[in-house]
Image: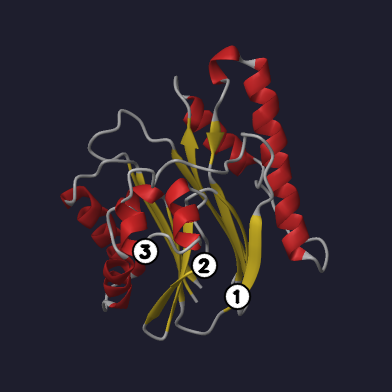
Amino acid sequence: MQIESLTHQGLLRENNEDRHMVNILDYDRALLVIADGMGGHAAGEVAAQLALDSFEGFRPRGPDLGAELLGHMDKAQNTIMLRSLAVPSFRGMGTTLTAVFVSGRSACWVHVGDTRIYHYHQGSLTRITEDHTVAGMLLKRGEISKEQARTHPYASILTKCIGCEPHEADSGVFDLAEGDFILLSSDGLHDLMTDEQIAEVISADTSIKEKLHSMISACLEAGGRDNITAVMAKI
């Protein structure tokens, strides 16, 4: 398994509130995590980092991997809530949080917010997660199209986040095959690239690092309105 990650502040933001983590356990097991914080006075950065810290040192301890990942999501929720109560300037901070644990030919995931997981298999790109946003909710109801959701004025208005009121995280498992790719992205990337554009970059005969640089460059050329972060693994 090959893994690379890349983050960029973007062209308009004064700081980078995205955080990501890659924890390689051995040759075919790894934890990938991405978080996009929100809140003023650096609170978004704090929330995102606390979320990642909650997964630090994660190692499966039993047969129910999904329950273990969800337990760490709960830990992140509690930690951020306690910190926001203890520090007045951190009140209202929160973060998206998306994690994937790859083990051989299986990927177990948990997710809250609008960071995403994509799975690329035999030339086809599948979005694994749903956006917990107002636009994502309208898309799920069939009231708007996928393209309308991408450009909707409420595309970035979260309906769930870690550190806000408790919400049940989404979770699941998907199968992997040799040559597959997994992409975790923050909204600064997928808000400016269509799924078709992402698939085109992944399909190119380039290294993982070159693919990530191509994605970041495309987002910057499109305006770079937000922080941009991507984590990619090739099975």
Q: Which is nearer the eye, 82 or 30?
A: 82
Cα–Cα span, label 3 and label 2: 14 Å
Q: Inspect the image, locate mark 3, and give the three-letter code of the amino acid beneath it.
A: Lys
Residue marked by disc 1: 174
In the image, residue 32 lies at what x, y percent?
Answer: 55, 58
For the residues labelled 3 and 1, say whether their Cβ atoms are less than 8 Å apart.
no
Going 63% across and 22% down the picture, which residue do you hit? 84
* Circle number at residue 128: 2
Going 33% across and 67% down the picture, which residue do you hit? 195
* Circle number at residue 146: 3
Q: Inspect the image, locate mark 1, and give the three-letter code of the amino acid beneath it.
A: Phe
Going 59% across and 72% down the picture, which residue do you hit? 27
- Where, by quadrant of the figure, is residue 95 drawn? top right
Q: Inspect the image, locate mark 2, and give the three-letter code of the amino acid beneath it.
A: Ile
Element marked by disc 1: strand
Which of label 3 and label 1 is nearer to you? 3
Cα–Cα span, label 3 and label 1: 22 Å
Element marked by disc 2: loop
Identify whether 144 is placed above or below 133: below
